[in-house]
Amino acid sequence: MDLVSNKIVEIIKSSLKEVYNLEETSNLVMVEIPKSKEHGDFSSNIALRLAKTLRNSPLNIANSLKNSLENNELILKVEVVAPGFINFFVKKDSLSEIINKIIDEGKYYGRNDFGNNEKIMVEYVSANPTGDLHLGHARGAAYGDSLTRVLKFSGYDCLREYYVNDAGNQIEVLGESLYQRYLEALNLPFDLDKIGYQGKDVKNIASQIAKEIKDKYVLDDSEDRKLYFKKVGRELELSKIKRDLDLYRVSFDHYQSELDLYKDGKVKNTLEALKNSGYTYEHEGALWLRTTDFNDDKDRVLIKKDGSYTYLLPDIAYHKDKYDRGYNHLINLFGADHHGYIIRLKAGLKILGYNSDNLGIQIVQMVRLMENGEELKMSKRTGNAITIRELCEDVGVDVARYFFISKPMVSHLDFDLDLARKHSSDNPVYYIQYAYARCASILKRVDDVTKLDSYTLLTNDKESSILKELASFKQILIDICKYKEVNILSNYAYRLASLFHSYYNECKVIDETNLPLTKERLCLVKAIKITLENALNLMGIEVKEDM
C-alpha cells in the first residue's frame, strides 16, 4: 500500500502520541486492506499489539483512539470491531491519488528501497551438467528468477548464481558415457555397462564429437583422453542447459565452477580450517565432522576411506566462498531430496565461524504433470523424463513460468496440462494477459491520456476496490522480499486482472455523453495497464497488446 495507507499509518502514530504519549511506534503500526468491504478500506491491529504494553484490553485501547483518529480530513469514519481491530473508511477521492503516482513513475512504479542496497546472493537450478533440465528444475528456475527480479526491483544488490557440479563422480561417469557412445558412433565395439547416462542427449553429443575428431581417441586410454571427454561433455551439456534457460527467460550473473574451487585451493583451505576447529575426528579410516553438536541426527563423513571427498566438503567450501565474497545474505533453492542436507551444511558454516542464520534454504517440492486426470511421467516423443524445452514448446513459456510460481514452493504442485493449453479465461495466464490487452485496446481508441488534478468522479465500488489494489503493489513486492514467496505476486496479478474484468463488464469507460468521467476512467485504465505490465515483467511473462 502507498500514499493513503502511509497517511493512515502517520495518523495512527499521531493519535498514539496524543492519547497515550507513545513516541516510538514506527515498527508497530501496520495497516492492511480488509477482505470484506464491510470492514472498511483499511484496517489496523495496533490495539491488539499494544495491549500488553498499555496493560489494557485491545477494545478499550481502540475505543480510546477512535475520536482522535476520526479528527482528520482524510477519514470518513472509524469503526472499532472486537477484539480490537480499527477499521478505516476513507473519503473516496483520497484513494485516487495513486493514479497520478503510477502514471508519473510508469515502468518504475512499485520500485522501492526495502533492500537498502544489501548484497544478497540467490543460488538456484544448479543442475549437474550431465543431462537435460526437467520439471523440478523448471519450478526452481521460474521461482528463483522471479524472486531475483523482485529483489533487484526492491533495492537489493542481488547476484544470481548457478553452481556447476563439475568435479564430482557424475562428471567421471559423463566422460566415460560419452567415450562409449563415441565408439558406438564410429561403429566400433563399446561397453553398454559403462554408459551411466543413457539419455539421448549424450548420444547426440558423442555423434557430434565423432564427426569432429574422427578416430583420434579410439585406441587411447590415457588421462588426456579421459580429461577431453569430461571437458567436452561438461561444456556441451552446460551450453545446452544455458540455451534452455535462455528459452525459459532465466538468466544468471555468474556460473560458479566446483572445479575452480579445487583449483583455487578453496576446498583444501576449508578442510584445514575444519580440522583446526576441533570438530573433526578419524574413525574407521574416514574423516568425520561432528555435526551432532549442531542438532544433526548423526555425524557426517568429509573424507571417505578411499581418500575421496564427500559432497559435503566442497559444498561447505562453496558457501564459505559466498560469504568471503561479501554476500552476508544467502538464499538457496534446493530440491526436495536435499531437505536433510540443510542441518549438516549449516553446521559446517557455524564451525567455521559464519552466521548460518543468514543462509536461507528453501525446498522446491515435487511437481506432478497431470493430463486427463492422470500423472504423466514420460515424454511421448522420447520416452524420457519431460524437459523444460518440451514443456515450453507444448504450453508456452508464459504459462510454464506462471504455473510454477503460482503456489508456495513448500507445497507439492500438480501442473494441469489440460488447463495450461487452454486459450480462455479458465487459464489464469491468459486471463491476466487479456486484462492487459483490454487496457491497451481501450487506450488505443483515444489520442492521449493526460493525468488530471483530481478524480472526484471515481466513486463506484469497483473503482474503489481497484484503486486500493493498485496502491498495494509496492507493499506486495516488499512482502515478497520479506517472506521469499513469489506466489504473492502471481496472486496479486490475478486479483487485479479479475477486478478489472469485472469493472470492464459493468462500467463503460469511454462514454461520449460524460466526458469528465471518461477522462478520469481512462487515467484509471492507464494506471491498471502500467501496474499489470510491471507485475508481468517481474514474473518474466510477456505483455501482449493484442490477443
Image: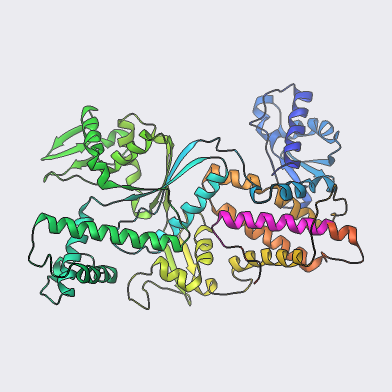
Give the camera-side residue of 405 and 42.
405
Give the camera-side residue of 131 and 222.
222
Q: Which range of residues does the magenta coloring cover?
A: 520-542
Q: Is residue 262 left or right of residue 355?
A: left
Q: Quadrant of residue 16?
A: top right
Q: Is residue 535 left or right of residue 191?
A: right
Quadrant in which the C terminus appears: bottom right
User: Does the rendering let one see residue 439?
Assistant: yes
Q: Quadrant of residue 283?
A: top left
Percent coordinates x, y for residue 86 in the rendering: 75, 39
Percent coordinates x, y for residue 474 in the rendering: 65, 45
User: Does the rendering let one see residue 492?
Assistant: no
Q: Is residue 62 magenta?
A: no
Report the predominant secondary structure element of the magenta stretch.
Answer: helix
Residue under the image location 24 percent in, 59 percent down: 232
Q: How many marks?
A: 0
